[in-house]
Image (cartoon, rainbow, N blue to C red):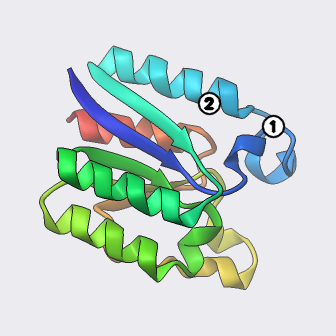
C-alpha cells in the first residue's frame, strides 16, 4: 500500500475550539479519522502528524524525501514566513515527489499578511478554503 505523509503545522491540534467561525467545528481527532478513512478508500496509508515546532516539521519533510513519499502539508502560520520549510519542500518536489499545500480557510480572504505563501511556489498544488475537505481532495489528487 502506498504511503503519504499528512503534515500539520502549529495550532492545528486545536481544531474545533480554535476560531470555529474560521476553521469549522471539526476537531483534530475527527480530522485524522476522516483522513485515515479517505486514505483507506483510496488504497493509501496515511501517516497524519501535527507539530508546533518548525524544526520537527522540516525533519518530517526530510523523512519524506529520504523515503520518497508524497506529502499533504498544512503549514499553518509557517506558510507566510518559513523559508527553511520552503527549502525543505522544494527539495522534496525537485526530487519528483508531490507536495500538496492545504489550508482549511482561504488565506486570501483573510488578513493581508496571510495572502503570501512562501510554500506555494514550490508546491505541486494548493487547495484552500474548502474546510477539512481540502485534505480529502489532496488525497484524491495523489491517488490519481
Write the residue at 84% across / 48% down. Answer: 18
Q: Position of residue 17 (x, y in %)?
A: 87, 41
Q: Earlier in the sequence, mark 2 or mark 1?
A: 1
Which element carries disc 2, helix, strand or loop?
A: helix
The residue identified by callout 1 is 16
Q: Is residue 57 above or below residue 42?
A: below
Write the residue at 43% across / 63% down. Answer: 58
Q: Position of residue 116 (x, y in %)?
A: 55, 82
**CA distance for labels 2 and 1:** 10 Å
Q: Is residue 54 above or below residue 9?
A: below
40 relative position to 69: left or right: right
The residue identified by callout 2 is 31
**In the rendered image, is residue 120 in sight?**
no
Q: Is residue 18 above or below residue 85?
A: above
Write the residue at 57% across / 28% down. Answer: 32
Between 70 and 24, the residue placed more toward the observer is 70
* Quadrant housing the N terminus: top left
Residue 91 figure quarter = bottom left
Q: Which mark is residue 56?
A: none
Q: How many numbered marks appear?
A: 2
Q: Are marks 2 and 1 in contact (CB under 8 Å)?
A: no
Q: Position of residue 11 (x, y in %)?
A: 72, 53
Which element carries disc 1, helix, strand or loop?
A: loop
Between 109 and 78, the residue placed more toward the observer is 78
**In the rendered image, is residue 51 in sight?**
yes
35 relative position to 98: left or right: right
Residue 81 figure quarter = bottom right
Amino acid at each position: 500500500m502506498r504511503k503519504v505523509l499528512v503534515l500539520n503545522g502549529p495550532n492545528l491540534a486545536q481544531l474545533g475550539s480554535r476560531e470555529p467561525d474560521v476553521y469549522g467545528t471539526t476537531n483534530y481527532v475527527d480530522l485524522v479519522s476522516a483522513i485515515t478513512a479517505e486514505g483507506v478508500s483510496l488504497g493509501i496509508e496515511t501517516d497524519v502528524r501535527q507539530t508546533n515546532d518548525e524544526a520537527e516539521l522540516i525533519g518530517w519533510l526530510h523523512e519524506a524525501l529520504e523515503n520518497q513519499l508524497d506529502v499533504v502539508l498544512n503549514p499553518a502560520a509557517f506558510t507566510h514566513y518559513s523559508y527553511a520549510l520552503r527549502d525543505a519542500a522544494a527539495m522534496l518536489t525537485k526530487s519528483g515527489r508531490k507536495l500538496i499545500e492545504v489550508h482549511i480557510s482561504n488565506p486570501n480572504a483573510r488578513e493581508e499578511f496571510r495572502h503570501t505563501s512562501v510554500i506555494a511556489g514550490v508546491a505541486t498544488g494548493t487547495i484552500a478554503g474548502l474546510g477539512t475537505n481540502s485534505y480529502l481532495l489532496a488525497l484524491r489528487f495523489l491517488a490519481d
